[in-house]
Amino acid sequence: MDEPFSETKADLESERHRINDEIKNYPTPNPACDAQFNFLLEERARIAREIQELEAAEPDNRPVE
């Protein structure tokens, strides 16, 4: 894995873990109208998509032509 990809992926993984911890420790109840909780869920989904896109773009994962 190239260094820039490794660093970016590590940063995204770190942020995903931080958000997961915040969601896990979020005070109950967490109603659907809770904007902060919904924001955390959206951020977690966005970071997961970015990690998938990054992994797809890694030189080691590109199809051989």
Image (cartoon, rainbow, N blue to C red):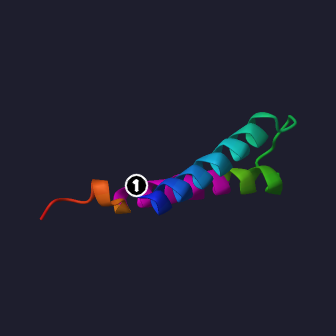
Residue drawn at x 57%, y 50% is: 10
Pick the front one: 4 or 63 = 4
Left or right of 59? Residue 20 is: right
Q: Position of residue 62 (x, y in %)?
A: 26, 60
Left or right of 8? Residue 41 is: right
Does the rendering let one see residue 49? Answer: no
Residue 54 lies within the magenta run: yes
Q: Position of residue 24 (x, y in %)?
A: 75, 34
Does the rendering let one see residue 50? Answer: yes
User: Which portion, as a residue range, is magenta?
Assistant: 42-56
Identify residue for label 1. 55
Residue drawn at x 51%, y 60% is: 50
Pick the front one: 25 or 3 = 3
Pick the front one: 26 or 28 = 26
Q: Position of residue 47 (x, y in %)?
A: 58, 56
Left or right of 27? Residue 44 is: left
Residue drawn at x 38%, y 52% is: 1
